[in-house]
Image (cartoon, rainbow, N blue to C red):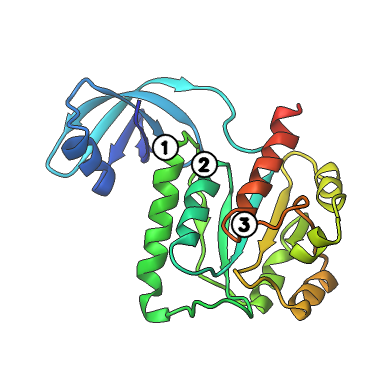
Amino acid sequence: MQRYFANYEENRFFINDDDYHHIVRVMRMVVGDEIYCVNNDQQVARCTIENITENQVVAKVLQWIEGEIELPIHVSIVSGLPKGDKLEWIIQKGTELGANKFIPFIAARSVVKWDEKKGDKKLSRWNKIAKEAAEQSHRTMVPDVLSPIRLKELIEISNRYDIKVIAYEEEAKHGEVANLTAAFKNMQKGQSLLAVFGPEGGFTEQEVELLKEHGFVACGLGPRILRTETAPLYLLSAVSYHFELME
């Protein structure tokens, strides 16, 4: 059954814009068809389509659905701005795996240069990808995708998090395997994790040292060197295994 994030009021959901088009034009649903809807409080309801106008679908709540879908900890993924559509892949698959937020990072070795003039259009696309992935994977919230930030802003943002890690390939080359496990063991459900990943060329030593000075822990992600678009997915899978499957 299709799932949509929508405005809720008095036992009804009101669906507009792209989701309206998807219901009416793509899925060709009619009054009486059932869908799942999610409100701003991350509550899920099974609904029936009650009315379809020229620009809005109204769905009436039949039953509220109980159950916890989200990861037990809040994971924000900071990705060194990569080439091509790799960030779109990270956002889509990272949303499916439970990420809470995505923060593009303009690293020293980022090949791509952020164009402020085209920034709003790209940001809108990234957030749309996150929303569609959240609906597909039956999430109860849509992860935020922020505008790219620089190192100074990253350090400022990091003060809001309980645990902060850097996925650093040099640690993996030297066989470091304990730091990520230790970070997980030190976390309680409901806490927040900020995980930083470099671009294709990796971090500079200066970036790593500065982040370490501000409370980040450098971690290896196993003995193999992962691509910039693979490493965040590895970490999210490890989070799910540790906090969900091992429970």
- Which numbered marker is on residue 96? 2
Question: At x 49% / y 77%, what residue is drawn?
Answer: 112
- Which numbered marker is on residue 77? 3
Mark 1 or mark 2: name the one nearer the start of the chain.
2
169 on left or right of 123: right
Question: At x 77% / y 73%, what residue is drawn?
Answer: 208
| Camera-side residue of 69 and 240 | 240
Q: Give the x, y percent position of residue 66.
A: 54, 22
- Other residues around mark 2 within 10 Å, as few (<14) / some (14–19) / many (≥20): many
Which residue corresponds to mark 1?
136
Q: Amino acid at mark 1?
A: Gln
Q: In the rendered view, tell whether residue 157 sits above or below residue 162.
A: below
Which SS class for mark 1? helix
Q: Are marks 1 and 2 in contact (CB under 8 Å)?
A: yes
Which image quarter: residue 205? Answer: bottom right
Q: Is residue 168 visible?
A: no
Mark 3 or mark 1: name the one nearer the start of the chain.
3
Question: At x 16% / y 33%, what residue is drawn?
Answer: 52
Q: Amino acid at mark 2?
A: Glu
Q: In the rendered view, tell whether residue 172 sits above or below residue 36.
A: below
Which SS class for mark 2? helix
- Quadrant of the frame with the C terminus: top right
Badge count: 3
Q: Give the x, y percent position of residue 199.
A: 60, 69
Cα separation between marks 3 and 2 = 13 Å
